[in-house]
Amino acid sequence: MIPFFEYNWQVRDEWFAWCSQLPEEELIRFRTGGVGSFLKTLFHIIDVEYSWIRGIQGKEDIVFDYAGYDSLEKVQSLSDRCRSEVIEFLKENREGRATDAVRVPWDDEKFTVGEVLHHLIAHEIHHIGQLSVWARELDLTPVSAHYAGRTLKPFVSYES
Amino acid sequence: MIPFFEYNWQVRDEWFAWCSQLPEEELIRFRTGGVGSFLKTLFHIIDVEYSWIRGIQGKEDIVFDYAGYDSLEKVQSLSDRCRSEVIEFLKENREGRATDAVRVPWDDEKFTVGEVLHHLIAHEIHHIGQLSVWARELDLTPVSAHYAGRTLKPFVSYES
């Protein structure tokens, strides 16, 4: 699973860099599909990942208000901050506890840790696919989504 | 990895069912982003998955001509046919050989089996994200991409 998180984070950072070419009004402009804008999509991906990773750990949910993250810099800074906590969690849980049960305050269903991690991976890739359509609608080349041939930055992996 | 393939196939089948509500001209209509239409996207996902899985096995690449798959039924039938071969491969390789090297005729680079499987999973989820935007542009509710809470059909998994 960890390579998928590393892939997602690398692609996410490339989208932050890509977005910096757009004026702010294009970043926050409502678009059809997904959660509605480039900036809100990136915010949503971060928010969902962070909430579930805290949920797995039985930590209290921290709700971010999108209104407070109205620029690319603020959302990117949120991404970096949340990611460092997610990295710590993944490092500590390398050997996995995939079948442990997870309950979160925003859902009545019970999940497993493995299911949640799969959910987060698919969630981000899916939303990034949406950004790629909006990019083409602006007549711009989107960030590549290719996994194969990409040298992953080892956010979590380390020599031990 | 196998649950991701099962997730992708389940979502793919739900998109086939979803697409059946559209008239053929909407299925083949050119749209901005990705590979350009609902039908071509589904065809492309199948084609890429099948080619790489054959590539991993050192089998000759079989090139499908999109012109021969000009209806939802034909593409769905192609999906079922190719998938049964992919399922066989995944069943035989449950214990993994993720670090084995893979060379394919359409790329000069060398990959590992694990890298290719990650690539295929991300590839399908990404393109499905694109379909979801096009669905909303048609004012229709897309197929849910949710992983958590979905009971996966065990295409590959089995009691042994």
Image: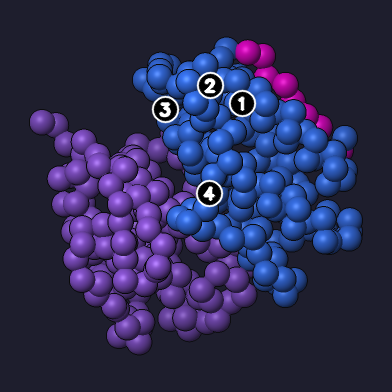
Chain colours: A purple, B blue
Q: Secondary structure at mark 4?
A: loop
Of callouts 1 and 4, the N-terminal one: 1
Q: CA distance from mark 2 to mark 4?
A: 20 Å
- For the stretch drawn in magenta, the main secondary structure is loop
Q: Which residue is mark 1?
A: B86
Please tell me whether residue A145 is drawn above or below residue A61 in the rendered image: above
Residue ranking furthest to the left: A160
- Which of the two residues, B66 or A33, is positioned nearer the viewer here? A33
Looking at the image, residue A157 lies above or below residue A115: above
To which chain does the residue with label 1 belong?
A: B
Report if the CB atoms under discs 2 and 4 are less than 8 Å apart.
no
The answer to whether residue B22 of the structure is visible from this angle is yes
Q: Nearer the viewer, residue A142 or B68?
A: B68
Q: Amino acid at mark 1?
A: Val
The answer for how far apart the CA atoms under marks 4 and 3 are is 25 Å
Which residue is label 3 attached to? B114
Q: Residue A149 versus residue B120: which sits nearer the camera?
A: B120
- At 73% from the left and 36% from the top, the residue drawn is B79
